[in-house]
Amino acid sequence: MKIASIVVRACRLPPASPWEDATNKVQGLEFVFVELATDTGLAGFGLTYTVDIGGTAIKALIEDYLGPLVIGMDPLDYEAVWTRMNRQSRRLGLGVNAMATAAIDVAVWDIVGKHYGAPLHRLVGGSRTAIPVYVSEINLRSDDTLDDLARRVAGYRAQGYRMAKIKIGRDDPEEDVARICIAQEKLGPGGRVMVDLNQKWSAAEALRLAPRLDALDLGWIEEPLAYQDVDGHAALRRAVRTPIALGESLFSREQVLAYLKAGAVDVVQADVAFVGGVTEWIRIAHLAQAFGKPVAPHYMMELSLPLLCGAPNGFMLENVIGGSLAELGLVASSVGIVDGVARPGAAPGHGLVPDWAAIEAAALRPDEVRAGFRGGSK
Ligand SMILES: [Mg+2]
């Protein structure tokens, strides 16, 4: 079997609910989609994404360089396909090329699954058939009150969720504590609250502020510091009992390894789209396993679910409010979550079916981006 052709599309749309955290106000999610056709008639669907910036570059990188590079290769040799893209794009550093590689890699795995008639979660290990889900909200608007938060968390609990992640990082740390306490109250006994700082703190602030959170029995503190600060995370981890979670800002297994070796992370949150797809994500999961650490991938719920079910150290699935592919209207079916537990589908490959009409309606138009881009970083 050979990859015969590739079609690339991209769209840009706002989250289904407004997203704002301690360091960013999200303007648009940009998705890049790939259709790989083979000479046997089998086809694969892949995708990647970026927040706010870079979708046009990812699309061009696939169309002009990575796509032509893999045409003629056998998609069953997923390691060979991935390595070819990785070696050829290494001069670009890490980031846009890993995101572009992911779209093709995900499509390759879709073909592998269809060829063998196996769903993705079994292709990557088949460790289990159900994964606990935590609800994850991106809502730290300045006008968001404790009552608003209480109402939302009570709603999550009513939907069957026992674990919820909220954004913190207010200028007044007592407001953070109040938000955590109200969320814990609304989740009730047996519930667990995680917090995400989106790299808000300096290393010194973290050592001053984190011990206050340490008394609150949180599930984890996520991205407390700048993603480059391995030593700072290691120092913080030594100073608190609460697990430290991170990984959404890392793009390779080498970057994850640096955190693991430094004793700077407890929960590895690699994002399948940011690390170059399924092939690299599996390597990272196994790497984390070797260090005795669980994986709880960032976002991309529809793809993260089968990966978590494959990995022996799969921990929990993130359901970001306003960000699932189904909520955004980009795919036909949604992940079934019952009482805070998700189960992967049985369709061969990843089973995602794109809604091309919806994708076309939100098509990424470079001229519009150029005219209106202002960014959302604080
Ligand atoms: Mg996060």
Image (spheres, grey):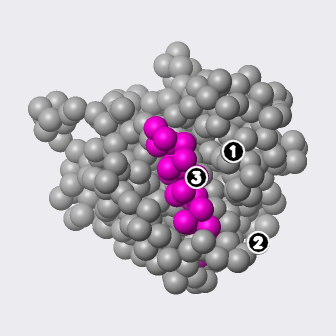
Q: Nearer the viewer, mark 3 or mark 2?
A: 3
Residue 333: percent from the left, percent from the top? 42, 75
Look at 58% across and 52% down and name the residue there. 177
The residue that mark 3 highlights is 177
Q: Is residue 79 above or below residue 115?
A: above
Q: CA distance from mark 2 to mark 1?
A: 37 Å
Amino acid under disc 3: Val
- Circle 1 packing at 10 Å, graded few (<14), some (14-19), many (20+), is few
Q: Is residue 166 magenta?
A: yes
The residue that mark 2 highlights is 128
Which one is in front, 100 or 131? 131
* The magenta segment: 161-184
The quarter of the displayed image where residue 262 is located: top right
Of the two numbered discs 3 and 2 on the same chain, state the one appearing first in sequence: 2
Q: CA distance from mark 3 to mark 2?
A: 36 Å
Amino acid under disc 2: Arg
Q: Is residue 162 magenta?
A: yes
**Figure disc tally:** 3
